[in-house]
């Protein structure tokens, strides 16, 4: 029992370290640098320590210090309790969602099976949607509690957009559930050990629609109408500053990681390497013994999984700095008139093929 608790604690610390400790801060630098490279600029490079600039990486520390020391401003007429609570409601679901995302398989370490997921729920995929939808309340409350017309308009756009694309996003993964016959993310990942069993080959249309709907859910360009600067100042977080402002941005970046992880699990072979099975990897390191070979394979699989996650983060960043913002009516038309009928057609075609 104590060993199980210790293993779970390690997995929790690892997930928090990777998402909150590494990806959330590093993506602030990646967003600046990638946009600079695409636009033929240098990008953030002014912050330094003793003259060393480290490609602008010290801006991560500078931004953190700025957030900590900036005044926490609550506008007159705002609801101080809800104004303070809303960034937390937006951030926490983004972190909790990762508890059911497996970042590796099952390994035999010191005579005990170790499953690289914090909570291996039978309804893991349903849990992702249930928890992720709670973040909508954070954005709505932020706009309403700020006592600002632009914030309120931004929160209303957020509500309509997130609810609309939640419907489509839920329907796009029905095909995946039909193919793999499970809502357990660990089982879906394990079922893709063979390269041609990857979700991208079995559900290509589902992949395109799911990724599109996920980016719309995260309100990233070209779906950033809820925070359109040219129309709404900054949308739902116009009246936020300091750490509260930083929490909204952190939630957005962590959601990017979660989207990339879910896409990797559902469509891109999870932690598996193309044409190389887990058994062949284990036999390759058989000279290290059972625990040693499993440990090496575990590290390889975790590395492969996060390499795929990094690729999809890069892909989302590339879309963000390539496409212009859609008009709000175009966003709604895409969700209800194009993606929704396509997702229903995808379910029908998948069902017919399976029959």
Image: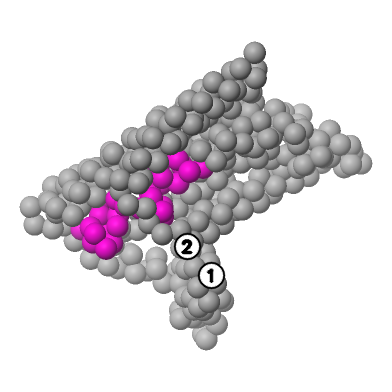
Q: Is residue 166 visible?
A: no
Looking at the rendering, which quadrant does residue 243 occupy?
bottom left
Reply above or below: 304 against 182: below
The stretch in magenta equals 211-239
| Whole-percent x, y for residue 222 in the image | 41, 54
Residue 86 is left or right of residue 25, and the answer is left
Query: Which of the two discs, 1 and 2, labels the residue nearer the N terminus?
Result: 1
Local secondary structure at mark 1: helix
Mark 1, other Cα within 10 Å: few <14 / some 14–19 / many ≥20: few
Residue 214 is left or right of residue 305, and the answer is left
| Residue 38 numbered mark, or none | 1
Tell me if label 1 and label 2 are in contact, CB under 8 Å: yes
Q: Write the residue at 39% across / 68% down.
A: 63
In this view, the residue farthest toward the left is 77
Is residue 217 covered in magenta? yes
In the rendered image, which quarter contains the C terminus?
top right
Which of the two residues, 215 or 67, is positioned nearer the viewer here? 215
Mark 2, other Cα within 10 Å: few <14 / some 14–19 / many ≥20: some
Q: Is residue 194 visible?
A: yes
**Cα–Cα gap, marks 1 and 2:** 8 Å
In this view, the residue farthest toward the right is 287
Residue corresponding to mark 2: 321
In this view, the residue farthest toward the bottom is 51
Q: Write the residue at 48% across / 75% down.
A: 43
Q: Write the residue at 55% across / 34% down.
A: 206
Reply above or below: 148 against 119: below
| Whole-percent x, y for residue 54 in the image | 56, 76
| Whole-percent x, y for residue 203 in the image | 61, 32
Residue 313 is left or right of residue 296, and the answer is left
| Whole-percent x, y for residue 157 in the image | 26, 45
Specify the color scheme.
one colour
């Amino acid at each position: 029992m104590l060993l199980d608790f210790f293993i779970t604690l390690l997995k929790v610390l690892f997930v928090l370290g990777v998402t909150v400790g590494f990806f959330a801060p590093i993506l602030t630098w990646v967003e600046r640098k990638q946009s600079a490279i695409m636009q033929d600029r240098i990008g953030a490079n002014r912050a330094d320590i003793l003259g060393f600039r480290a490609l602008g990486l010290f801006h991560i520390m500078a931004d953190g210090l700025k957030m900590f020391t900036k005044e926490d401003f609550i506008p007159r007429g705002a609801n101080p309790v809800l104004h303070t609570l809303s960034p937390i409601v937006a951030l926490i679901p983004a972190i909790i969602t990762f508890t059911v995302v497996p970042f590796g398989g099952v390994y035999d370490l010191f005579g005990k099976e170790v499953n690289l997921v914090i909570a291996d729920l039978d309804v893991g995929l349903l849990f992702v949607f249930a928890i992720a939808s709670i973040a909508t309340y954070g954005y709505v409350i932020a706009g309403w509690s700020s006592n600002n017309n632009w914030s309120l308009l931004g929160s209303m756009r957020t509500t309509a957009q997130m609810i609309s694309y939640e419907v489509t996003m839920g329907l796009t993964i029905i095909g995946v559930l039909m193919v793999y016959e499970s809502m357990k993310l660990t089982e879906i990942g394990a079922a893709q050990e063979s390269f041609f069993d990857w979700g991208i080959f079995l559900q290509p249309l589902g992949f395109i629609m799911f990724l599109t709907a996920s980016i719309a859910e995260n309100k990233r360009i070209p779906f950033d109408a809820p925070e359109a600067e040219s129309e709404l100042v900054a949308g739902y977080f116009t009246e936020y500053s300091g750490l509260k402002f930083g929490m909204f941005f952190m939630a957005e970046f962590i959601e990017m990681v979660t989207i990339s992880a879910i896409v990797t699990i559902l469509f891109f072979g999870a932690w598996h390497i193309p044409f190389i099975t887990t058994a062949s990897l284990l036999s390759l390191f058989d000279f290290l013994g059972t625990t040693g070979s499993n440990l090496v394979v575990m590290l390889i699989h975790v590395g492969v999984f996060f390499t795929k996650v990094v690729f999809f983060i890069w892909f989302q960043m590339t879309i963000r700095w390539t496409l212009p913002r859609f008009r709000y009516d175009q966003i709604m038309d895409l969700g209800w008139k194009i993606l929704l009928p396509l997702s229903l057609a995808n379910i029908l075609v998948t069902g017919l093929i399976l029959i």
